[in-house]
Amino acid sequence: MPTVPGRYYFVSDVHLGASGDTEGCRERLFVDFLKSLPENTAGLFLLGDIFDFWVEYRDVVPRGFTRVFGELARLSDSGCKIWFFKGNHDYWVTDYFRKELGITVVDEPYEIVDLFGKRFCIGHGDSLNCSDWKARLVFRMFRNKFLIAVLKALPTHCIFKFARWWSSKSRKSADGYKFDVTESDIKAFAENFGRSEDIDYFIFGHFHTPSCTVLECGASLYLLGDWATLANSLYFSGNGITGLGFPNSQI
């Protein structure tokens, strides 16, 4: 991917439509963030779980988020390139974002991106190097094309009800998941991958708590936070990464 001069932003785990957000605070916070992006924003990487659930049919998509889509369309029309990485809460995306908003949808668990001479390995992070067999099984089931087709054959309102229930049940809380990929799994993946590939930065979401670790391989691992109380993002313009809502705002 050729680098276009400007800023590149990284966001994850907004969880728009979360059951606990009855006042729509997350959407207002995210819309304000999108509006605040400077004119020299060249790229926006949405690294999964932007929506608390997303089940898309050929002629039906979840209701709501009109202002979010309006801002994403404005950014896309202005020349900002937008990538949407599928997360474990909003995996069932087909072509709505691409056709209506000009967004590139990424199916792979991670992607290597070159920006200003630096190499990034980025993704949501829910499937990388997972040591728990139950989590691996759930991951494969939710991405199995046959099971997805069977599920979508059910009435739409049943699927939306199930999706909302599952999102509410599986969303991270203070106690965490009963089974899931761990931060240790992600760090092990990054260390091993960083030894075989020339990577400067790893950026993933999924863990809801912002952090930055300098790995033994020499790369920096950033884990993005969620948007439960404040905006959380990173941006890169060629002179290092700066974070909004991070304990260490610049490395």
Image (cartoon, grey):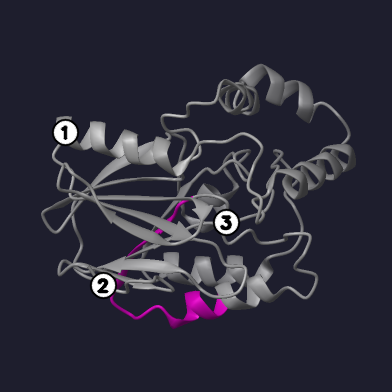
Front-lying residue, 170 or 248: 248
Which of the two labelled residues, at mark 3 and mark 1, occupies the earlier sequence position?
Answer: 3
- Name the quadrant containing residue 143: top right
Which of the two labelled residues, at mark 1 and mark 2, occupies the earlier sequence position?
Answer: 1
Which mark is nearer the camera, 3 or 2? 2
Which of the two labelled residues, at mark 3 and mark 2, occupies the earlier sequence position?
Answer: 3
State the image coordinates of residue 10 (x, y, percent, origin top left): 39, 61
Asked if residue 198 is positioned above or below residue 129 in the image, the reply reads below
Residues at marks 3 and 1, CA–CA distance in whole angstroms = 31 Å
Asked if the residues shown at circle 3 and circle 2 are in contact, with their CB atoms under 8 angstroms apart, the answer is: no
What segment carries the magenta color? 31-47
**Residue linked to disc 3:** 50
Asked if residue 200 is positioned above or below residue 237 in the image, the reply reads above
- Name the quadrant containing residue 112: top left
- Name the quadrant containing residue 188: top left
Q: Which mark is residue 117?
A: none
Q: Can you name the residue that lies furthest to the top here? A: 146
Residues at marks 1 and 2, CA–CA distance in whole angstroms = 24 Å
Secondary element under disc 1, as helix, strand or loop, is helix
* Amino acid found under the numbered disc labelled 1: Arg
State the image coordinates of residue 163 (x, y, percent, origin top left): 77, 42
**Residue linked to disc 2:** 250
Secondary element under disc 3, as helix, strand or loop, is loop
* Amino acid found under the numbered disc labelled 3: Ile
Asked if residue 14 is positioned above or below residue 54 in the image, the reply reads below
The residue drawn where x is 48% and y is 39% is 182
* Amino acid found under the numbered disc labelled 2: Gln
Front-lying residue, 128 or 119: 128
State the image coordinates of residue 51 (x, y, percent, origin top left): 63, 55
Asked if residue 27 is positioned above or below residue 189 in the image, the reply reads below
**Residue linked to disc 1:** 195
